Amino acid sequence: MPTLNENPFAVLTAVVAPAILTNASSVLCLGTANRIARVVDRTRVVTAELKALPAGCSECQGLLRQMESLQVRAQLLLRALRLFYATIGSFAAAALISVIGSALAVFEFRLAFRAAATIGLAIGAAGVIGLVSGCTIMVHETRLAVHTLSEEAQGAPPI
């Protein structure tokens, strides 16, 4: 089996993979932040509508349920955004550790190289788990948003 000294693509792969995943996480952060902004805007509209209506009216109940749904969505989005930020840090750290590990391999510090490889792999795996978890939360939030939209379109009070 070739060593890292004999296979430059192994080092390139170890550095490029975390960089691509960092970029993907950054794009997800931007999209998630945009969705949070939309939830905040919708919350402000619903709050204004509630203030304009007399207390206890039938429309108020539907708007209050919509406010509850918006609060749940905001919490889900915030949790996903935190995970995506953590993945950016994880993948950046994994890329740096990969560069350090490849330098250790060149200078034939085998024990230090193995430690760097193990740490880099663990941090990269944690980043992937965070990325998948954040995406799962985003799917749940999207389902909630579509469900609410569907109920509004049908004329039923939103949840």
Image (spheres, grey):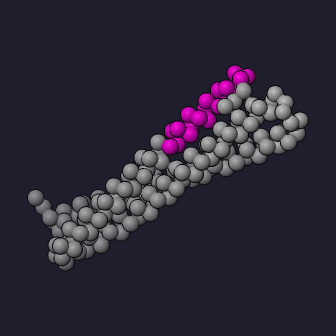
- Residue drawn at x 22%, y 64% is 8
Q: Position of residue 156 (x, y in %)?
A: 71, 23
Where residue 88 sits, quadrant-wise, is bottom left
- Residue drawn at x 84%, y 30% is 57
Magenta segment boundaries in residue numbering = 137-156
Residue 20 seen in the figure: no
Tell me if residue 143 is in the magenta stretch.
yes
The correct choice, above or below, for 144 with respect to 153 in the image is below
Tell me if residue 153 is in the magenta stretch.
yes
- Along the line of sight, which residue is nearer the eye, 86 or 99? 86
The correct choice, above or below, for 44 with respect to 57 in the image is below
On-image quarter of the N terminus: bottom left
- Along the line of sight, which residue is nearer the eye, 20 or 62? 62
On-image quarter of the C terminus: top right
Q: Position of residue 106 (x, y in %)?
A: 20, 74
- Along the line of sight, which residue is nearer the eye, 48 or 94? 48
Residue 9 seen in the figure: yes
Where residue 120 sits, quadrant-wise, is bottom left
Left or right placement of residue 153 versus residue 108 in this view: right
- Residue drawn at x 77%, y 32% is 61
Q: Position of residue 19 (x, y in %)?
A: 39, 60
Q: Which residue is most to the front?
A: 56
